[in-house]
Amino acid sequence: MNPLLASLHAYPFERLKQLFANVTPNPKYRPISLGIGEPRHATPQLVLDALARSTAELAAYPPTAGSPALRQACAGWLQRRYGVSVDAATQILPVNGSREALFAFAQAVVNPRAGNATVICPNPFYQIYEGAALLAGAAPYYAPSDPSQNFNINWDVIPGETWSSTQLAYVCSPGNPTGAVMPMRDWEKLFELSARYGFVIASDECYSEIYFRDDPPIGGLEAAVKVGLTDFKNLVAFTSLSKRSNVPGMRSGFVAGDAAILKQFLLYRTYHGCAMSGMIQVASIAAWNDEAHVVANRQMYREKFAAVTPMLAEVLDVRLPDAGFYLWAAVPGGNDEAFARDLFAQYNVTVLPGSYLARRAGGNNPGTGRVRMALVAETAECVEAAGHIVAFVKGRQNK
Ligand SMILES: Cc1ncc(COP(=O)(O)O)c(C=O)c1O
């Protein structure tokens, strides 16, 4: 077997299963999970209709590069959303959701034979980045999110020798789990570093359409154009329909950016055999071309967060994030595992310990003392869970 497989860490939900293994949740309450970040709003009818009318696509092998119509739909969306022009033929590739693409990208980009191959991962993070780095034969460098900078990463704290060996940097904006949107000045810094040290930036933007401020989150390609990087050199953005259009089961997204990198990535993907089904391509075109369902979806999240956040802020150190569908809350007492376990036992509400979403680095696990709550269920269910959390925290305080 590939010995690198042994370096992979247990997935956060496996650890959660172990944490809850000997706990019997209070049967007085129905189970409510704020654990998994899986969208649960309804899939738009226009996507279902497109799937229903495209079954003939199953009779042919789809091209790995995607149909010209799909690439055009993705390019059109980038233009409308970010004001960015890309060449649909060379600067776009469809992918089967951003997860597989984020993973596969490291396999295509990283040269494990170059000394100390390093991949920058945010910390806390989406664990796929770490696994992708490890299986590509690189060492992850965990860049801490800084609570004093709205949970963004201070790129200045990463030493020069780390940048020298960095081949790939994952950034996640809006962030999972923090909800932080990386500001323009941090993009500028990162572009400067990439130009100086020659590493590739993988910009994970799968939460870009769920936001709570007036201005939509800035995208990597948009930031690049603002600093004159119009060829997107060493930059690839990862976008997904899963959260935008409530189709996590469809497995559809796309990558866009540096044409030279995407050419090599397409080569990799051709061997990997991960062409998107023709049916999914047709449904994806319908989804990218419609914005009304996205606006309605965002409004549902806004109403949900407006109802839940103030309730929780009464008892936890938590505030409305910039974007995404998570609350990233500090828990009283600072023991995130005990908080999650006892909350589950007493109220049958599942939250994810923050330390499971981060690694100890520089003597500190930046997830410790926090929990992630995914507000993906309907508002009433999230409000019910928030009520239980309030009662739970107050009950602990009175002990
Ligand atoms: C930060 C982040 N990136 C990427 C993904 C993958 O999403 P998908 O593969 O559905 O596009 C997720 C899923 O939860 C995520 O949280």
Image (tube, rainbow, N blue to C red):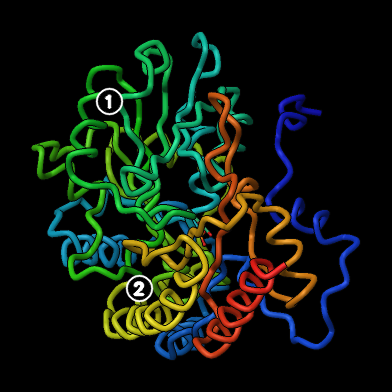
Q: Which mark is residue 211?
A: none
Residue on which disc 1 sits: 194
Q: Is mark 2 on a helix, strand or loop?
A: helix
Which callout, 2 or 1, points at the residue further toward the start of the chain? 1
Residue 251 visible to the viewer: yes
Residue at point 41%, 59% (across, down): 206
Q: Is residue 135 above or below residue 368?
A: above
Residue nearer the viewer, 114 or 66:
114
- Indicate the quadrant containing the C terminus: top left, top right, bottom left or bottom right: bottom right
Farthest residue, direction front: 398
Q: Is residue 89 above or below residue 192?
A: below
Residue at point 29%, 37% (across, down): 235
Residue at point 75%, 70% (across, down): 344
Q: Where is residue 75 in the image (x, y as percent from the top left)?
A: 24, 60
Q: In this view, does 76 lie above or below 292?
A: above
Lateral position of residue 319 relative to residue 13, left or right: left
* Neighbourhood count class around disc 1 (C-alpha, 10 Å): few under 14, some 14–19, many 20 upward: many
Lateral position of residue 173 relative to residue 96, left or right: left
Q: Residue 285 carries which label?
A: 2
* Neighbourhood count class around disc 2 (C-alpha, 10 Å): few under 14, some 14–19, many 20 upward: many
The number of numbered discs placed on residues in the rendered structure image is: 2
Residue nearer the viewer, 53 or 227:
227
Which amino acid lies under the numbered mark 1 shown in the image of this protein?
Ser
Residue nearer the viewer, 124 or 314:
314
Q: In which quarter of the image is residue 187?
A: top left
Q: Position of residue 16 (x, y in %)?
A: 75, 56
Which amino acid lies under the numbered mark 2 shown in the image of this protein?
Ile
Residue at point 76%, 86% (across, down): 29
Q: Where is residue 214 in the image (x, y as percent from the top left)?
A: 19, 70
- Indicate the quadrant containing the N terminus: top left, top right, bottom left or bottom right: top right
Q: Position of residue 397 (x, y in %)?
A: 64, 66
